[in-house]
Amino acid sequence: MIPCRSGQRGIALIVVLWILVLLTIVVGTYAVLARTESLQSRFLFDTTRARYAAEAGIHRAAYEMRNMDIETRWVPDGRPYTIDFGAARVEIRITDESGKIDLNGADAQTLSDLFISRGMDETEAWHLADAIEDWRDPDELPRLYGAEVDDYEAAGYPYGPANEPFGSVDELQQVIGMSWDLFRELEPMLTVHAGGRINPAFASADVLAANPEISAEDAAAFVEERRQFHPRDQQALMLPDGTMVSLQGGGRTFSIRSRATLDTGTWSEVQATIELGGDQRGRPFRVLRWRDNIEDR
């Protein structure tokens, strides 16, 4: 009987050990799940805080642009402004839309110069520039290098040109010959809210460099010099092509980029295009475009 009892005890010990192993696995699994859910909750909480802090930056920018005091008004030329909002550090950049190239106002020469400045072949640049003009003009007559409905059909597009002004910069993606990579590169430089000529007081270096008489290096140097001054200084600067630039003026439509970062490293970014002026609901500005967490270019 003794050998039998020893065998039973050995089996019991093995069973107990397996139970302990299973319990350890179950407890460990629940511990990992609990920690994961805790981390996810914390990340969601931090992301939400950063998101609303970034949105607060948009409202702060609108407030500053409505400031009637030129001495303290922020300058909408892309220079960074930093504020603290709760536990977040918010960096705000404002660009007056008059410092961009208007898709509905720029002629074919301006557009082709822009494309060439981004490395496009001259012939290809003129094809795209004429295609843009054919997209926005009301007729069905193609320009020399342009494209109307027959050309779109021949290229396999299920649509033709709108034959009306661009309603948004995003619409440019539909123009024949426009690639996604090129659109992403051009988008920050374009607008449909300026209407007139480019205002160099608020233009980025990339926009200025679209002028064939201004190199990328000279454009960057001009922007750096411009940021040393404030419109209250009544300073006039000279572009490399000899054009005198007053740092005052501008429009009522602005692109705003607000990025909020918490001390944990969690961040959120909001980009908006707004137009100042009350609406029917009594709001001090109108949102024309709104995007969240767009990747840096």
Image: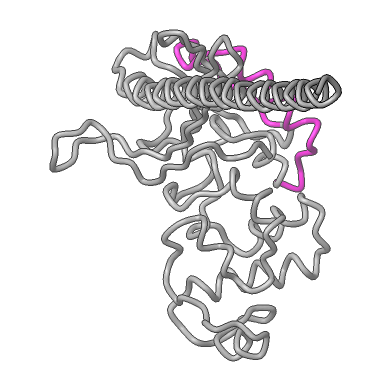
Q: Is residue 79 visible?
A: no
In the depicted structure, whether residue 105 falls above or below residue 164: above
In the depicted structure, whether residue 128 falls above or below residue 248: below
Q: Which quadrant of the structure image shows residue 172?
A: bottom right
In the depicted structure, whether residue 292 falls above or below residue 159: above
Q: Quadrant of the C terminus?
A: top right
Point out the residue furthest to the right here: 3
User: Where's residue 22, x and y in %?
Assistant: 67, 28
Q: Nearer the viewer, residue 278 or 40?
A: 40
**Colour pattern:** one colour
Relative side of 46 to 225, left or right: left
User: Where's residue 208, x and y in %?
Assistant: 67, 39
| Residue for point 65% across, 36% down | 296
| Residue for point 46% across, 49% down | 196
User: Where's residue 271, x and y in %?
Assistant: 48, 36
Relative side of 130 to 99, left or right: right
| Residue for point 69% across, 71% down | 177
Whether residue 226 appears in magenta in the rendering, the answer is yes
Whether residue 25 appears in magenta in the rendering, the answer is no
Q: Which quadrant of the structure image shows residue 265?
A: top right
| Residue for point 46% across, 83% down | 139
User: Where's residue 174, x and y in %?
Assistant: 57, 69
Q: Is residue 260 visible?
A: yes
Q: Quadrant of the N terminus?
A: top right
Magenta highlight range: 211-239
Q: Nearer the viewer, residue 154 or 296?
A: 296
